[in-house]
Amino acid sequence: MIPRHDPQLKSFASDNYAGVHPEILRAIADANGGHQIAYGDDVYTEALLSVFQRHFGERAQVWPVFNGTAANVVSLRAMTAQWEAVICAETAHIHTDEGGAPEVVGGIKLLTVPTPDGKLTPELIDRQAWGFGDVHRAQPRVVSISNTTELGTLYTPEEIAAVCAHAHERGLLVHLDGSRLTNAAAALDVPLRALTTDAGVDVLSFGGTKIGLLYGEAVVVLNPEAAGGIDYIRKTFMQLSSKMRFVSAQFEALLSGDLWLRNARQANAMGQRLAAAVRDIPGVEVPRPVEANAVFAVLPREVTERLQKRFRFYTWNEATGEVRWMCAFDTTEADVDAFAAAIREEMG
Ligand SMILES: Cc1ncc(COP(=O)(O)O)c(C=O)c1O
C-alpha cells in the first residue's frame, strides 16, 4: 500500500504521533500465524511475567491493557474501596487529560494539589491527607504520582522513596503513572526498579505506546497487598484483549533487551538538543527544566501560529502562550535542527 502520509514528516506535538518501532512490528509479525489461546492464556503473555519480574522484582504481577488511561483507572480502582480517594497533582494526567475517566468509569474521587513543577512532596501530600475517619470526607487511600511528570520534570529515586515512606506512614498506598517511566529511568541512568519497586511504589501503570509500541500499556502490581480483583476489573472496564498475544509480544520485544533504553535515550537526547538549540534565541524562554523528552517554551503568540503551520505542536497554556515540544524515539538530530532553524527564522 502506498502511504497516505509523508513518512519523513515529524512533529513535536506528542510522542504518540510517532509510529511503531521496527523491532516491535517484527515482534508482532513473529507472533502471528497459527492459533493461540485467547484472552491472555497464550505463550507470549505467559512469558511476560518473567520479563517484567526481571525489571521489577519477583513479586511483580502484570496485566496488559490497551492504553494509559485504562492502566491508570484499572490500577486506581483496584487500590481503592468505593469510599476512598486518590491524592494527585493538579496537573496529573488522571485529572487533566483523561476526560474524567477515573471519575466516570472508575467512580474514583480525586483530591488534587497545586504544585510548582508537577511533583508531589510529603508536605504537598499532607494538603489532602486528612480527615481520616470522618464519614463526610472521601477517605484518602492512594497517592498517585507521574514520572516523568506532565510538566516534563523528573522524580529521582530518593524523591519517590520520600513520597512512598511518607504515604505509607499515613496508611496510604502509592500509584505511579509511568506512561514515560522509561524516559525517566534513561535520563537518570537508573534501572526501572530504582524508580518503582526499590523506592516503595505499590502499583505502576507502565507505558509502552509512547516508547515504540503499536499500542499497549500494563498494570504492574509491585505490592500484592495493595490491589485486588484486577482480573475482573480489567474485564469489566473493557480492557481484556482477546488477542492478547500481540500486546504481550510487543512488551517482550521492548523489555527483554535494551530497546526501551535505546528509545528513551534517543527521545531524551533530542529534548536536550532542542532545548540547547533554542535557549539563546532572543524572545524564546524555556521556563521549566528540560529533564527528559519534553521542552516547554514561551514565545510570541504570532510566532507560534506561524510555526504551527510548518510543524505540529500544542499550546500548553493559552493564557501565558506556553507551548510544549515533545520528542519521540524516532526524532532525529536532523528533525530537531530543522525545527530549531524554523523557530529562529520565525522569531526573526
Ligand atoms: C502522564 C500520562 N499518563 C498517561 C497517559 C496515557 O494516556 P492514553 O490513554 O492516551 O494512552 C499519557 C498520555 O499522554 C500521559 O502523558
Image (tube, rainbow, N blue to C red):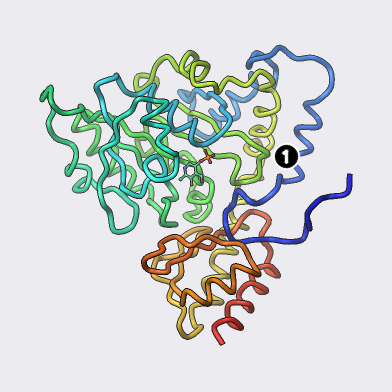
Residue positioned 70% across, 18% down in the render: 43
The percent coordinates of residue 289 (x first, y second) are 41, 65
Q: Is residue 191 visible?
A: no
**82 or 224: nearer the viewer:** 82
Q: Secondary structure at mark 1?
A: helix
Inspect the image, locate mark 1, and give the three-letter code of the amino acid beneath it: Ile
Q: What quarter of the picture does the C terminus occupy?
A: bottom right
Q: Would you identify the image quadrant in which residue 338 lies?
A: bottom right
Residue positioned 84% across, 22% down in the render: 33
| 234 sits to left or right of 203 | right
| 205 sits to left or right of 86 | right
Residue 142, compared with residue 270, is above or below; it is above
**209 or 171: nearer the viewer:** 209
| 150 sits to left or right of 140 | right
| Residue assigned mark 1 | 24
**267 or 317: nearer the viewer:** 317
The percent coordinates of residue 109 (x first, y second) are 29, 31
**190 or 92: nearer the viewer:** 92
Q: Residues within 10 Å of mark 1 (few under 14, many from 20)?
A: many
Q: Is residue 345 visible?
A: yes
Name the residue at the right extreme. 1
Q: Would you identify the image quadrant in which residue 331 lies?
A: bottom right
| 63 sits to left or right of 197 | right
Residue positioned 64% across, 61% down in the render: 11
The percent coordinates of residue 319 (x first, y second) are 37, 65
The percent coordinates of residue 20 (x first, y second) are 71, 44
